[in-house]
Amino acid sequence: TTKWESPNDMFGPATVQGGRVTIDERVTVNWDHPEERHVIDVLSTTGSQEVPPAYYDSYIDHESVSHEVSEATDDHGNEIQGDAQDRRLSSGGTEGSGLPDVPHHGELTYTLYVSTLAPLAEQSVLIAALIMIFVYIFILLEVIHRTLVAIFGSMVALFFFFIMHNGHTESISTLMLHMEWSTLGLLFGMMLMVGELSHTGVFEWCAVRLLVASKGSFNRLMILLCSLVALSSAFLDNVTTMLLIAPVTIDMCNILGVDPRPYLIGEVLLSNVGGTATLIGDPPNIIIGSSFDEIGFVDFIINVLPCIFFFCVPATLILVLQIYKYYLSTEKMATLDVRTLKKTYQVYDEPRLLIAGTTTFFVILIFFLHPVHHKDTAWIALIGAFITIAFTNPHDVQDALRNHVEWDTLLFFAGLFVLVEVCAAMGLLTAIGSALASVIKGQPEEDQLTLAITLILWVSAITSAFLDNIPYTATMIPVVKILADELPDTLPVKTLAWALSFGACLGGNGTLLGASANIVTAGLSTSKGFGISFLNFLYPGMLVMFVTVAIANLYMLIVYVWI
């Protein structure tokens, strides 16, 4: 008899005031042998809260609820399918235990949904992988817009999911849950605020000041912009950082009459690297910090930030300067008439700047205070956006929504989120995590930590380069917890969490679709007439990813294994 156990579903008694715990588990049963009975046991160890703790701990009554599901036949010997199958429910206390009867104040209730999968479901992981590969091929070829590719890809994935579940379709409400509404809300709110700021002349004003600081050197200008982005991304979400700095960069390049794409790509690469340094810099870090009680804001500062700012950021800057060496050195920056520039590019709508600038300042300030209030940044961005619109554009909301919001970018994110979540439901991400765990546990004890750091880091980086790193991180966290629980002496949970953070965040540089900031920057650039294609991003992104991940790998081995 095969026994299935879920070690994560152990929870203590409810509080004195009463409580409710809801757990959702999916169990796959192989129904190839109809003569066997498939039993799912739900064990309850509830007791009276009025009993003294010592008595409660020593004497506990076990209630066993077994839900048996077996293949059944009717009077004529025909097999009964679906909901007509025989289902028997039996319950009762443990007999002969000699323990006193402890009165129960509550009941253990549950609902068991039984569904049969089509034979095609046995190849679900392969199908999910092929769908992702074809989506990337179509994005690479640019046959149609990447937004349509993501939407059609999610539809194909849902179609196969529909076939595997014998015609069961996902409800619209379930599809809505697949989307990362925090990311979409943050993007929507910041786009509105940045759009209002763009109508004041402040971005052009900032661009002129940056040009003056560059002192006529394209290299110095690239270093200034990238360093500013890396530092800002450590304490702001990297999407917010690029939404604020990308318009300044484009306006600055328009003044110079040069292509802004090298600067934008360099900035977004540094944004992903700099965002790795802190708990609030990148969404995977926020997920990791909220999932492990042992990890807080200061832990990231101590363990991750030194590697990022002392090694990864300088290395990325050097790589960016080398990659775009020809572009930065072939032309000399024209001599700038600073006085004329400052007179030409001035702030022309001061009342709007006062309103939008004040709101944006307080929104960013509250973002900085995220470790204190722990509120979702999407709420803050949305509230700030609607306050701004209410004062700057109260009678023409349609104009703000039409001109400020990059709807194709938001739809691309929505399609990508659904695609990745459906592929995850097919078992793609779980298969990656399970394979990783089995390889690590199969190694000698003295080699487990070295292998665990290296594998988690590189597998996370490569996976995050092609899949969105948010669902991947959420999938890998249970794997990390299980590894740390099963091998506590050799695999410290914090060390594994740092490897996951480095891999998931730095891996976002690998491709255009690896991180949210990449897609947002490409959308902003395209809207200004400078399209950034998948191939434009691939070479610099992959090179930076491999170098920074290698640096992080060496850093972790030195700090956590060799010293």
Image (tube, grey):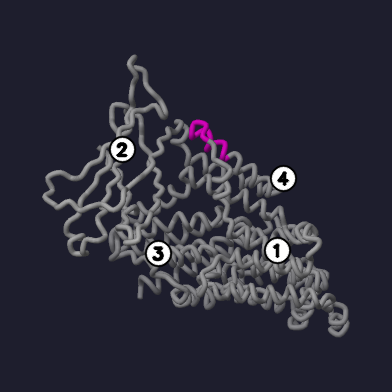
Q: Looking at the rendering, which quadrant does residue 291 occupy? A: bottom left
Mark 2 and mark 3 residues within 8 Å of each other at the beta carbon: no
Q: Which residues are magenta?
A: 157-168
Residue 144: mark in rendering: 4
Give me the C-alpha separation between circle 1 and circle 4: 25 Å
Is 158 in the magenta?
Answer: yes
Residue 391: mark in rendering: none
Q: Earlier in the sequence, mark 4 or mark 3?
A: 4
Name the side, left or right, on which 106 lies relative to 123: left
On the image, numbered disc 2 is attached to which residue? 67
Q: Which of the two marks, 1 or 3, is nearer to us in this view? A: 1
Q: Callout 2, which amino acid?
A: His
Name the side, left or right, on which 76 lies relative to 333: left
Q: Residue at x 49, y 47 (%)?
A: 424
- Is residue 285 or residue 51 the one in the foreground? 51
Q: Which of the two marks, 1 or 4, is nearer to us in this view? A: 1
Q: Looking at the rendering, which quadrant does residue 87 occupy? A: top left
Q: Residue at x 35, y 61 (%)?
A: 17
Q: Residue at x 39, y 56 (%)?
A: 479
Mark 4 and mark 3 residues within 8 Å of each other at the beta carbon: no
Q: Callout 1, which amino acid?
A: Met
On the image, numbered disc 1 is attached to which residue? 191
Mark 2: which secondary structure?
A: strand
Q: Callout 3, which amino acid?
A: Leu
